[in-house]
Image: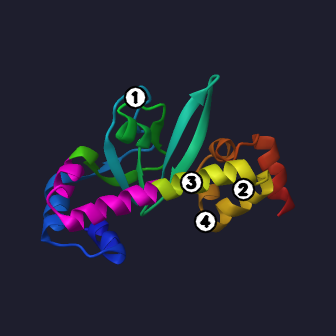
Amino acid sequence: MKLLEVFSRHFKTDPEIERFLMEETLTQSFPKGTLLSQQATYNKTVFFMESGLARIFYNENGKDITANFYPEEKIFANIDTIFTQQATRYNIETVEHSTITYCNYEKLEELCAISLPAANLSRYILGNLITQMSKRVASLQFKTAKEKYAQLLEENPNIILRAPLGMVASYLGISQETLSRIRAER
């Protein structure tokens, strides 16, 4: 199981975590364009991208704004719903045909109450989600368009080849024309 392999690189697993991953997670393939989660719902699912690409986005004034991309080995979720018990404002959609392993976050929390390794697993997942969000906020607040593009190429160089340019431009917070100019300058 790829998920167990990835987790084992970051913390010590045990038979209870292995059992949880075998019994409480599902792995499924989704066609391009599948909505895994819709805004205004209470989706408490945690996703792990086995293969493919997904994005999280919201709609603002009739435009889809991409908040983040999730390629292979990334963990993602509607963290606003998991932590606040409020309906999410985000949609999660596959950008490519994707194979995703997922589980209900509340089931993981139940396991954490009885297993220290599971608590470490939960801490790893939450730390991963918070770190992604923190980096994203810092990028939006402190980087120029060129710096955001350079960071995207450094961290996820193939996103520019895998996602439509309109999604990439909205992720960077710039127009498609500005993105084209920045790309031409490189």
Q: Mark 3 points at which residue?
A: 134
Callout 3: helix, strand or loop? helix
| Dot 3 alpha-carbon crowd within 10 angstroms: few under 14, some 14 to 19, many 20 or more | few
Which residue is painted at 23% across and 63% down in the image?
A: 118
Query: Amino acid under label 3?
Result: Ser
Residue 118 on the magenta span: yes
- Residue 16 visible, this orientation: yes
Q: Name the residue under label 2.
A: 148
| Dot 2 alpha-carbon crowd within 10 angstroms: few under 14, some 14 to 19, many 20 or more | some
Q: Earlier in the sequence, mark 1 or mark 4?
A: 1
Which dot marks residue 155?
4
Query: Amino acid under label 2?
Result: Lys
| Residue found farthest to the top | 61
Q: Mark 1 points at which residue?
A: 87
Callout 1: helix, strand or loop? loop
| Dot 1 alpha-carbon crowd within 10 angstroms: few under 14, some 14 to 19, many 20 or more | some
Q: How far apart are marks 1 and 4 (CA)?
A: 30 Å
Q: Earlier in the sequence, mark 1 or mark 2?
A: 1
Q: Is residue 151 above or below residue 137?
A: below
* Magenta region: 107-129
Asked if disc 1 and disc 3 are in contact, CB closer than 8 Å, the reply is no
Which residue is painted at 39% across and 35% down in the image?
A: 84
Q: Which of marks 2 and 3 is nearer the N terminus?
A: 3
Callout 2: helix, strand or loop? helix
Query: Amino acid under label 1?
Result: Ala
Near-viewer residue (70 or 96)? 70
Identify the image quadrant of the C terminus: bottom right
Q: Distance between the residues labelled 1 and 3?
A: 21 Å
